[in-house]
Image: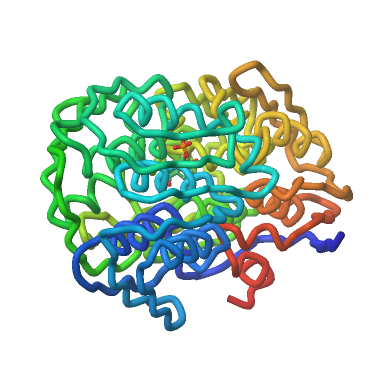
Amino acid sequence: MQKIDISPIPKFTRTLVCAPDKSITHRAVMFNAAAKGKAEVRGMLLGQDCLSTIDCMRRLGASIEQKGDNAVIAGTQGFASAKLDCGNSGTTMRLLSGLAAARAGTFTLFGDQSLSSRPMRRVIDPLTAMGAQIASQEGKAPLCITGQRLHGIDYVMPVASAQVKSAVLLAGLGAEGVTRVTEKERTRDHTEILLRHMGVRITRENDCITLAGDQTLHAADVCVAGDISSAAFPLVCGLITGGRVCVHNVGLNPTRTGLLEVFDQIGADYEVADIQWNGGEKTGTVCVRGLGHGRPFAIGHDMIPRLVDEIPVLAVLACYLSGESVVTGAQELRVKESDRIAATVRLVRAFGGDAQDTPDGLIVRGVGQLAGGCTFDPALDHRMAMSAAVAAAACKKGGTVLSPACAAVSYPHFWRMLAGEQ
Ligand code: S3P
C-alpha cells in the first residue's frame, strides 16, 4: 500500500484556482450525452468519479470527444444496452438509474466494493413506483434495469439526497404525466439549474419541484464552476495555520455554502469577492486569513445538505476551536464512500484530538494544536484522505496518509496543491 508523509506546514499559504465541481461535471456530461444536439463542456473535473460517468455515457452510445478538461458531446436519445461500470461513484449510479429506467434497453450498473455496499433502495423504490423494472442484490448494486414506459410520480423524499431527487426528476423527464418531488430539506439544485439551461420546463414552489413528462433535453454548453467541497481542504488548512489562502472560481450556489455558514459561526477571518454568474451557477473568490474568534460550531440537520461532504475536514477544524463543536442530523454520513462518522472520529483521535460519535453525528472538543505523528488509513475514501492530510499539515509532528491516490476521485491535483506545486 502506498503512502505519503506530510510534514507540518506553518502558515499554509496558497493562491489557487478551485478544482472543478464534481456534481456539475457529472450532470453536464450525463445530460448532454442524453440530449438532442451537440455541446461543449469546459473545465470538467477529471476525477475518477467523473471519468466513470464519461465511460458509461460512451457505452450508452454518446460521442464524447475529450481534449484535456474540455469535451464536445453529441448526445444519443436512444441508449444502447450496456454493462456500466460506475466505479466508486454514487452520483453516476443513482442519476443514471433514473435516466436509463425510461429508455428501451437493458442496463447493468455495477461498481467497486464501496459502491456495492451503499444503499440503492432509495432510488429503486421511487423509480419502481413510476413503473421501472430494476433487479438488485437486496437493494444494493449491481442493478439490472430493463427500460419501461414510466408514469409521473408525486414523491415526498424520505431522505435529504440530491442524488435521489435527481434520479426521480430524470426518470420523470421521460415519463408520461407530471412528476412532483417534495424535499423537506433543500438539497443541491444543480440538476434543476442545468435542466432549465437545457430547455426543460421545471419549476419550484417552496419545497416542491414540478416537471412535465415527455420532455427532450437540448444540448447546451456548460462551463463548470469550482467545487466548494474541494476548496474546503486548503481553506480549512489556511484557517487553522493562520496562513492566507485564496481560492478563485469557487462555486457559491447557496445550496452548497454551509462551509461559509460555519466560518461565520466560528467568527473566522475570511472574505468572499469577485461574484459572477455562469449558466445559473454563482461563483466567486474565497480568501481566509485565520481563525478569528475561533468559537466552536453547531451543525444541525437543516444545514447538513449544504455541507454534507465537508464534515470530516470541519471536524479537524473543530480540534482548533475553543470548546465543543457538535454535529447532529448527519446519519447520511454513515452511508457515504465509508462510514464517515466512524472514520472521522478515528481520524481526530489518531492525531491526538478528542472526538466522540453519536448515532447521527459527532462531538469534537477543541484541544489546541493536534500532536499528530501518526499513520492514518482512509480506507480508500477520498475525503477522509484529504481531511487527514489537512490534519497532518496543521499539526505539530506531521503524519502519514495511506493510499493517497484515492484523492483523485474528486481532486486529482490535491497532493500537488498541498505541496505548493499547483
Ligand atoms: C451529490 C450529492 C450528495 C453528495 C455527493 C454528490 C450529487 O450525496 O454527498 O458527493 O452530486 O448529487 P447525497 O445525494 O447522497 O446526499
Height in image: 29 above or below 105?
below
* Image coords of residue 383 (percent x, y): 63, 48
Residue 302, how many percent across, how many down? 40, 24
Relative vertical location of residue 205 with respect to residue 281 in this rendering, above or below: above
Residue at image coords 12%, 38%: 212
Q: Position of residue 390 (x, y in %)?
A: 68, 53
Evaluate whether residue 136 shows in this view: yes
Query: Most extreme residue toward the top, as rendered?
Result: 359
State the scheme by which the image is colored. rainbow
Q: Quadrant of residue 129?
A: top left
Q: Examine the rendered structure and indicate whether residue 221 appears above or below residue 153.
A: below
Is residue 398 visible to the viewer in this orientation of the structure?
A: no
From the viewer's perspective, tell me whether residue 3 is left or right of residue 169.
right
**Residue 332: x, y in percent?**
54, 28
Q: Residue furthest bottom?
A: 67
User: Residue shown at 65%/35% (left/top)?
Assistant: 117
* Residue at horizontal 11 percent and vertical 45 percent from the top: 201
Q: Residue at x 76, y 39 (%)?
A: 347
- In the rendered image, the quadrant that contains the C terminus is bottom right
Number of numbered callouts drawn: 0
Q: Which of the 4 image quarters holds residue 343? A: top right
Image position of 46 (left or right of 200): right
Image quarter of the N terminus: bottom right
